[in-house]
Image: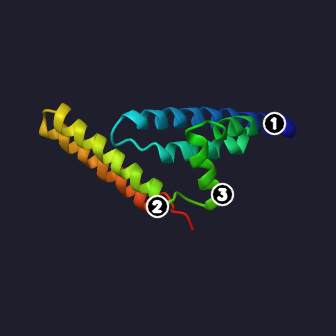
């Protein structure tokens, strides 16, 4: 009976990791168009989750034209290079400022966008490692 529980646990882990990977990929895709929602950490989390349970999904992610290069660089060099980090933060802040000041009439909404931007910048600066 112990063997059956072990197989069930492995299957549940696989299903859970694939679900979380797809959710993370979805959030990363939203981060491309929503200011303040970072794309890079979600895509890297997706790569990690897929690598743990499905070589096929991990390979699929690495072969995507836009995302694959960044994931491979991160995995091979241990982090995000300065240029990519710099451009990510610049693009994020450009979208935040455009959204907050031109499309958000309330000061509360502008403050929320600003706080999200500071959070995203801090995440990119202190949590996501740079290349060694």
Q: Secondary structure at mark 2?
A: helix
Residue at position x 47%, y 34% in the image: 29
Residue 116 shown left or right of residue 46 in the figure? left
* Residue drawn at (40%, 51%) of the image: 87
Residue 13 appearing in the image: no
Q: CA distance from mark 1 to mark 3?
A: 32 Å
| Viewer-side residue, 45 vs 88 | 88
Residue 90 location, x and y as percent? 34, 50
- Reply above or below: 7 against 76: above
**Image quadrant where one finds the N terminus:** top right
The residue carrying pointer 3 sits among few (fewer than 14), some (14 to 19) or many (20 or more) residues within 10 Å by Cα, namely few
Q: Which residue is mark 3?
A: 76
Which of label 1 and label 3 is nearer to you? 3
Q: Quadrant of residue 56?
A: top right
How far is disc 2 from disc 3 in space, using C-alphas? 15 Å
Q: Residue, x 51% and y 61% (percent of image)?
A: 129
Q: Earlier in the sequence, mark 1 or mark 2?
A: 1
Residue nearer the viewer, 25 or 10: 25
Spot occupied by residue 24 in the image (x, y as percentages of width and height): 53, 37
Q: For mark 1, what is the residue?
A: 7
The label on residue 82 is 2
């Amino acid at each position: 009976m112990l063997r059956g529980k072990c197989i069930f646990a492995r299957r549940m882990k696989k299903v859970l990791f694939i679900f979380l990977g797809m959710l993370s990929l979805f959030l990363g895709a939203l981060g491309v168009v929503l200011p303040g929602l970072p794309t890079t950490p979600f895509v890297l989390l997706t790569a990690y989750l897929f690598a743990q349970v499905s070589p096929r999904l991990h390979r699929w992610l690495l072969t995507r034209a836009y995302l694959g290069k960044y994931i491979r660089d991160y995995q091979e060099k241990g982090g995000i290079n300065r240029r990519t980090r710099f451009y990510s933060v610049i693009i994020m802040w450009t979208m935040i400022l455009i959204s907050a000041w031109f499309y958000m009439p309330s000061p509360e909404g502008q403050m929320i966008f600003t706080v999200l931007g500071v959070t995203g910048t801090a995440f990119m600066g202190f949590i996501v490692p740079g290349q060694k």
